[in-house]
Image (spheres, helix red, strand yellow):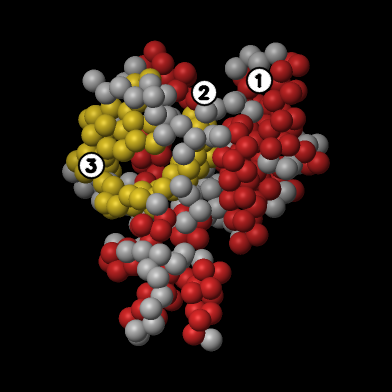
Amino acid sequence: MIESKAMFVIDHVSHAYIDEEGTEALALNDVSATIAHGEFVAIIGTNGSGKSTLAKHLNVLLKPTQGDILVDGISVSDDSRLWDIRRRVGMVFQNPDNQIVAAVVEEDVAFGPENLGVPRAELRRRVDAALTAVRMQEYRTHAPHLLSGGQKQRIAIAGVLAMQPQAIILDEPTAMLDPRGRREVLATVHELHRTLGMTVVYITHFMEEAITADRVIVMKHGSPVMTGTPREVFSQVDTLLDLGLEVPVATEVAARLRAQGVPVAADVLTATELGDALCPYV
């Protein structure tokens, strides 16, 4: 029996499925990890690495074939606590159009808590607070389909916030957005993490997003193969490239310079840091 006050305790979790050939395969293979309350964790990996499957286990969209997960101390194997878990953990998916259900922004944000029977006055307060948190209050009466991709994703996040979860899981939330939309969404998520102290699990294939997390977990073939701070993980350039992953551009340039004999630090993450490191040589 596992016990913890962490937001998520993942204890030897495996998830099996039947592939196209009728053979049992493992999407997750003996995964163990802990994510603390208030932590911002990025999960990266190539397609098929299990990162999205893991995300769906954290609010019981999927259940482990083996092992267990505690969500704020509640076991996902306890069917009687399913909705307790989902009230604690909100989820935002890749395509915001799949989460928008109403013809007016404020009605869409109200949809979740209204279905939980939240009283009218409290519902109004929650919608106002959620739209303010994602800086979309001026669009409250707009039609969602007229918004940009980044604005739609912020509305999807507001809908999750109105449910007042303790944690938010974002499964490649910027994959379908242009660079401006990606910046909007990432800035919004960090603001929520900073001001509300929310636990954030952020699935991404953009390394420039992953470096902004408190911690990075790298997945391969359904198992974590690396974990650490962004500096600890991305300083291992060759290992990440061998895993089929990209690294931040500044980190890769720094690695190439080191290979040419330029003594640039191994933990460079951003263009600014790379520029500062090269100033003595200009």
Quadrant position of the N terminus in the picture: top left
The amino acid sitting under disc 2 is Arg
Q: Position of residue 138 (x, y in %)?
A: 81, 41
Q: Is residue 200 above or below residue 21?
A: above
Q: Is residue 227 above or below residue 35?
A: below
Q: Are marks 3 and 1 in contact (CB under 8 Å)?
A: no
Of residue 35 and residue 98, the one placed in the foreground of this image is: 35
Alpha carbon separation for disc pair 1 and 2: 13 Å
In the image: residue 141, left or right of residue 61: right
User: Residue 29, which numbered label?
Assistant: 3
Q: Position of residue 161 (x, y in %)?
A: 61, 32
Mark 1 = which residue? 114
Q: Is residue 149 visible to us here?
A: no
Q: Are marks 3 and 2 in contact (CB under 8 Å)?
A: no
Mark 2 = which residue? 87
Residue ID at (34%, 21%):
75
The amino acid sitting under disc 1 is Glu
N-terminal of the pair, mark 3 or mark 2, is: 3
Q: Position of residue 265 (x, y in %)?
A: 40, 70
In the image: residue 157, left or right of residue 236: right
Alpha carbon separation for disc pair 3 and 2: 27 Å
